[in-house]
Image (tube, grey):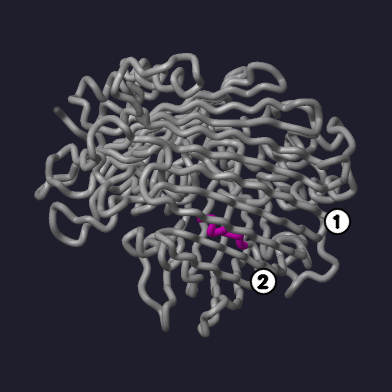
């Protein structure tokens, strides 16, 4: 079977760059940016999904965001003073997509810098739009029962722009040193040394880490309805704090993304090159490559109801001599991946999903997801039989078998209520996630006995839920803005997870070969040794000037497993300049 290198996609990309059909193209918000939350708030207050974008497919385009907010400024109901201030702030920070004149600074620095309040350097010419901003994140904190201070020290640069009003570009580079809380260090150990959301790193000082972050891409419109993005970054799919389908928890990865928007449809293709770190199966210093291809179709069924379907395949299988190349079968942008996978021998990991959101009135939105690795219709009769006995409709079971390991699926349900209980600028969010055993895991298709390359992961980090599988989680969040420059937030996570017991694979660790399970049936939800986790995070942030934030954060975390309880209190204070928060919610 013929295979092609990922460079084939690069050739395809640059063939479009040579076309005369290119349209004006926006770059995206950084993944995890706080403006995503505000845009969703405005969608709910507008009473319907935006026509400029489908919110579930993140990150959002800056151009589409500005167009929507300019529209929402006049159509959304009961906008508060804070709402209007944030809208103005976002539009001024993305003035290349606004007809309104950009604000000018009363005191520019050395005549050329901070001539606009939001940007260190901005150049807007006929052939070039350019914004350059410094990135600074410094923080210092304490952890209970630990003498060492926690710290974060990030210095970098963020650049975005547009050439000839046709090709957009973005890059972010930052050098980092950090000492994390002990529970984060334990997570790093579980991930073979990978820092959550980051890649390669080296030890720094006493119990610290030194790592470099780099993201960058180009983006362009091939036609009015078809846009391309190529580079190194991450993506997110959904409406909640978590995503079971595709989260932004893992490290950045190389991808080509195709967005096709027609009428009420948004169809997205992602072709990505991942890293099976830290395994090396074919020698040298090269980390094993693995690949992902994904289709997502989102449809605005009505102005209030948005429905989407998702399909994904992950494949690896490097042998001892040669790394696996990108399989050309998966380049087809419209085919059903399960059919392709069966066609080539059923070696890869294919998953399906669905997501939805319904905006009820102008205050509340309900959302959810379903993710499925595998599902066996023939086993349903066993579970139905067990359920009927449990509910009292049948006196005894007809079958001895139940709870097949093949039923690998996850469910998310959530609610987002803006101006909660009629209180302006107070938003409430509830979210629940339920994931059965062995979800996201796979088997060693090459028969090597090594860790399966096709697990739903990148750089030893989950591409789905960061805690893995076999878990139940509830999240409550209150966010309040008493003043346009103040943000107060409380977030509570409570989770239960069935962990491996006495070395037996209970289905929580997505990196274990699911062939090592005990039998095919009797795999119940939360099986194994129970782990109980509670995390309460309190935050207060003040914006001194655009994109310059002072933060206070307090975390109480309690974990119980195997009759051992670990309770941690963490306090952090810091300054962020054009830098994003990255929460460690696990």
Stretch in magenta: 579-586
Q: Quadrant of residue 292?
A: top left
- Please provide percent x and percent y for residue 288: 23, 51
Farthest residue, direction left: 321
The secondary structure type at the circle numbered 1 is loop
Q: In this view, does 532 lie above or below 313?
A: below
The image position of residue 367, as x and y in percent, is 63, 31
Query: What residue is at 65 percent from the left and 43 percent from the top?
Result: 62
State the residue in front, 95 or 76. 76
Residue 10 in view in this figure: no
User: What residue is shown at x 47% (from left), y 36% (from top)?
Assistant: 245
Q: Mark 2 or mark 1, which is nearer the start of the sequence?
A: 1
Give coordinates of residue 116: x percent, y percent: 76, 60
Question: Pointer 1: what residue?
Answer: 482
In the displayed structure, 12 sits above or below 344; it is: below
Residue 191 belongs to magenta span: no
Which mark, by number, is residue 575? 2
Which quadrant of the rendered structure holds the N terminus? top left
Left or right of 214: which side holds 71? right
**Principal secondary structure, stretch drawn in magenta:** loop
């Amino acid at each position: 079977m013929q295979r092609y290198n990922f460079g084939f996609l690069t050739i395809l990309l640059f063939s479009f760059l040579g076309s005369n059909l290119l349209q004006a193209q926006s770059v995206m918000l950084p993944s995890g940016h706080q403006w995503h939350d505000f845009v969703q708030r405005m969608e709910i207050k507008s009473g319907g999904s935006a026509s400029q974008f489908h919110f579930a497919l993140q990150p959002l385009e800056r151009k589409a965001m500005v167009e929507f907010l300019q529209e929402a400024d006049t159509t959304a109901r009961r906008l508060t003073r804070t709402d209007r201030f944030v809208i103005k702030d976002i539009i001024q920070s993305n003035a290349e997509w606004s007809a309104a004149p950009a604000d000018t600074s009363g005191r520019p620095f050395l005549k050329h810098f901070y001539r606009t309040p939001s940007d260190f350097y901005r150049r807007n010419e006929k052939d070039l739009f350019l914004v350059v901003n410094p990135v600074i994140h410094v923080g210092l904190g304490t952890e209970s029962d630990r003498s060492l201070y926690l710290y974060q020290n990030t210095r970098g640069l963020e650049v975005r722009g547009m050439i000839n009003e046709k090709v957009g570009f973005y890059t972010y580079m930052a050098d980092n040193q950090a000492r994390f809380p002990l529970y984060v260090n334990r997570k790093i150990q579980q991930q073979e040394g990978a820092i959550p959301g980051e890649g390669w790193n080296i030890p720094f000082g006493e119990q610290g880490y030194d790592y470099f972050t780099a993201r960058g891409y180009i983006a362009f419109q091939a036609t009015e309805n078809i846009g391309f993005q190529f580079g190194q970054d991450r993506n997110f799919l959904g409406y909640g704090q978590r995503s079971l389908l595709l989260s932004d928890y893992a490290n950045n990865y190389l991808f080509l993304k195709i967005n096709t928007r027609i009428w009420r449809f948004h169809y997205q293709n992602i072709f990505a090159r991942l890293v099976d770190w830290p395994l090396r199966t074919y020698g040298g210093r090269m980390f094993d490559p693995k690949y992902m291809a994904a289709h997502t179709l989102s449809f605005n069924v009505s102005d209030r109801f948005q429905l989407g379907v998702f399909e994904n395949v992950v494949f690896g299988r490097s042998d001892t001599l040669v790394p696996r190349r990108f399989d050309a079968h998966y380049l087809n942008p419209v085919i059903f991946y399960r059919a392709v996978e069966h066609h080539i021998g059923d070696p890869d990991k294919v998953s399906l999903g669905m997501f939805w959101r319904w905006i009820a009135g102008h205050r509340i939105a309900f959302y959810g997801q379903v993710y499925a690795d595998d599902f066996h219709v023939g086993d349903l009769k066993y579970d139905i039989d067990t359920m009927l006995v449990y509910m009292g409709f049948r006196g005894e079971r007809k079958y001895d078998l139940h709870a097949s390991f093949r039923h690998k699926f996850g469910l998310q349900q959530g609610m987002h209520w803006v101006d909660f209980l009629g209180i302006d600028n107070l938003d409430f969010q509830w979210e629940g996630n339920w994931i059965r055993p062995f979800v996201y895991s796979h088997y060693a298709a090459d028969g090597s006995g090594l860790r399966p390359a096709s697990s739903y992961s990148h750089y030893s980090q989950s591409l789905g839920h960061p805690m893995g599988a076999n878990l139940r989680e509830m999240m409550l969040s209150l966010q309040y803005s008493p003043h346009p420059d103040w943000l107060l937030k409380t977030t509570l996570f409570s989770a239960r997870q069935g962990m491996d017991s006495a070395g037996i694979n209970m289905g929580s660790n997505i990196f274990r070969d699911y062939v090592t399970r005990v039998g095919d049936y009797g795999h119940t939800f939360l099986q194994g040794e129970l782990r109980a986790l509670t995390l309460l995070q309190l935050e207060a942030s003040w914006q001194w000037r655009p994109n310059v934030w002072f933060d206070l954060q307090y975390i109480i975390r309690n974990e119980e497993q195997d009759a051992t309880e670990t309770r941690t209190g963490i306090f952090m204070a810091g300054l962020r300049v054009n830098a994003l928060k990255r929460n460690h919610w696990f």
